[in-house]
Image (cartoon, grey):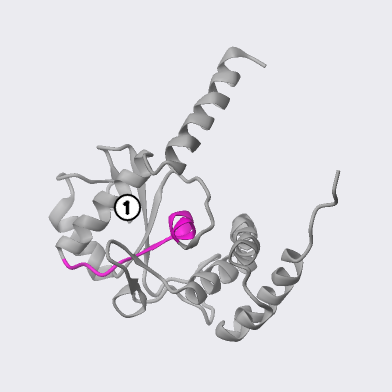
Amino acid sequence: MTDAAEERFWEGARNAGRFFMGEADVQKALEKLTRTLDAHRIPYAIIGALALNEIGYQRVTVDVDVLLTTEGLAAFKAAHLGRGYVEKFPGSRGLRDPEFGVDIDVVLAGAYPGDGRPKPVTFPDPSTAAARGARIALLPLPTLIELKLASGMTAPHRLKDLADVIEVVRVLTLSEEFSTSLHPYVRDKYLELWRAAQGHDPEP
């Protein structure tokens, strides 16, 4: 192993430690973003790996995924481009927080998960779908699971979404009956992954 490779290993370990202590740059960027959105009354929902952490499945990530409406994104850009945020490239939907060096990946309500092609499951309007807490807005668990299933089912490069569902089933001990709360489009895939989640590695 080269010195550079070993240093990358230890830096990764340090970053993970900061994340699980709640002190990583991505978490600081999340807090800043949610404060800003709330201050301007822009409806949103945090999705992706940070949402998984909020529901109990701890997984390190380096960017913030946020669901907005088209109007909400336009309002955010009008108020904050050049004042705390920049576009990833001119005209891009995605943003960057240069203070913390964190990407803000924006998903728009009405978009289709996974391959982007029309399907019965879409990203909902956060103004009506998000569940509000004291400091953050998230999608309800069934909706989050539906989106991950639809994504992984239709996009080979998004298989991590299916692995996330398996881990959420394990961590939250979701039941087989949880499938009845899901859209029929993804129900069979949930049951397949639920059965997979019941397996265990053999003892060494």
Query: Residue visible at 70% across and 69% down?
Result: 193
Name the quadrant of the N terminus.
top right
Residue toward you, 141 or 91:
141
Name the residue tied to disc 1: 92
Q: Is residue 155 magenta?
A: no
Q: Is residue 45 magenta?
A: yes
Position of 184 compared to 63: left or right? right
Amino acid under disc 1:
Ser
Is residue 89 in view from this perspective?
no
Position of 86 compared to 49: left or right? left
Tell me where residue 49 appears, x and y as whole percent: 48, 55
Query: Residue visible at 31% across and 63% down?
Result: 136
Residue toward you, 51 or 70:
51
Does 71 sit above or below residue 92? below
Q: Residue furthest top?
A: 3
Q: Based on the displayed image, in which of its 4 quarters is residue 140 positioned?
A: bottom left
Query: Residue visible at 65% across and 76% down?
Result: 175
Does 110 sit above or below residue 32? below
Identify the magenta region: 41-54
Residue toward you, 80 or 128:
128
